[in-house]
Amino acid sequence: MKLKTFFVLLLALIAIQRVNAQAKSYILHTVAFYNFENLFDTINDSNIDEEWLPDGAQNWTSKKYNQKLENLARVLSEIGTGSIQDKKNPNSPTLIGGAEIENRGVLEDLVKQPKLASSDYGIVHFDSPDKRGIDVALLYQKKHFKVTSAINIPLIIYKKQMDASAKKKNEADDASDDKSEVELNSERVYTRDQLLVTGFLDGEEINVIVNHWPSRSGGEKKSSPFREAAGALNRKIIDSLVKINPNAKVITMGDLNDGSYNRSVKVALGAKLKKTELKESGDIYNPFEQMAKDGNASLFYRDAGDIFDQIMISQQFTLPDYNSFRYWKAGIYNMPYMIQTVGQYKGYPLRHSINEVGFSDHFPVYIYLIKQIN
């Protein structure tokens, strides 16, 4: 009888533990990055935007511009709305990093789109020195994220950095149609600033860096020093944040124009493949490196896929407890309607053409942050 009673009590205890485990609930936030690919309005500006005007090469009319906004809004509203613990997550991304943005005005038009308006996105944007006039920005849901500071940090690079390292001539053009501009006197290469935004995500301080690193124009190897300089600047920013706060939580994301295996990411920034490799607070984990090894891609060029769009996190997001926001998992958002279905570029992202307003030549990427609340 005593033995029987013991087993009954043991089974009851196991059942109670299971109920408690099932009763756990979490706060979930999606963080996304999307290269909007030439999000230009139809107004002639001081930057080089003649191609993106009604009488320009793209015949960029108000109708096409509005369709582009509608397309982007559809994608952004859906990212991260998958399932967690068999429950639907209805919320669009809390934080969205963006690239290839002409000005603040196009972002204001974007967040007013019907599919995004209810999310009440705020905007952090600065004009960068890029001569094409394309910038990076951060959109954030005001009800969840409170901005405390924002700064654009310039990437100062010079043509001589490319020339000094380039021994091979006539390399193939790169996978990006993004071109850096060079000032003839100083030969400075004008490219995008790195945007640093600090704020409180549901009361917890985090730092977000939004990037669009220099293109591969002139060839991957020849232009690599520019992106290595961008990675080094990223590393410097992160080190500064950790010096101020040893427990700083940092997210760095963007179109890096390099894969997770390139020197700019692996050496200059020092991103790690595995969470077990993280030893210090400022160490960076890149979940997209394994995804690339598994054959996933956020863009394609010459029949080869790669992941140039990456979201990386500092060690503090990878700690084993869930008492504050932690990294859960990452993904690439590539729904069928965003993919070219016919022709030479079948399987590629459905981008804009002269006859069709697509989405982008990149797929957006995202991560989930979760926090246990009971």
Image (tube, rainbow, N blue to C red):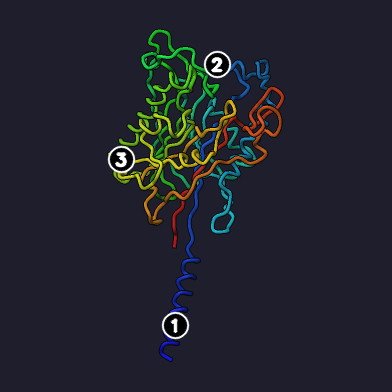
Q: What residue sits 38% from the left and 28% below the top?
A: 153
Q: Amino acid at mark 2?
A: Ile
Residue most toward the top? 185
Residue 259: horizontal and vertical position, in percent? 47, 32
Q: Which residue is mark 2?
A: 48
The N terminus - image quarter:
bottom left
Disc 2/disc 1 C-alpha distance (Å): 78 Å
Mark 2 or mark 1: whose residue is earlier in sequence: 1
Near-viewer residue (335 or 3): 3
Q: Residue at x 38, y 34 (%)?
A: 266
SS at badge 1? helix
Residue 109 vs residue 147: left or right? right
Q: Is residue 354 visible?
A: yes
Query: What residue does disc 3 label?
Result: 242
Check the image and name the residue furthest to the bottom.
1
Q: Is residue 257 left or right of 52 when viewed as pictured?
A: left
Residue 199 coordinates in the image, percent (x, y): 41, 42
Mark 3 in CB contact with mark 1 (< 8 angstroms): no
The residue positioned 43% from the left and 33% from the top of the image is: 261
Does residue 269 appear to the left or right of 8 in the view shown?
Answer: left
Label 3 amino acid? Val
Quadrant assignment, res 117 = top right
Q: Residues within 10 Å of mark 2 (few under 14, many from 20)?
A: few
Q: Position of residue 372 (x, y in %)?
A: 44, 58
Secondary structure category for the residue under label 2: loop
* Rendered location of residue 322, percent (x, y): 41, 56
Q: Which mark is residue 7?
A: 1
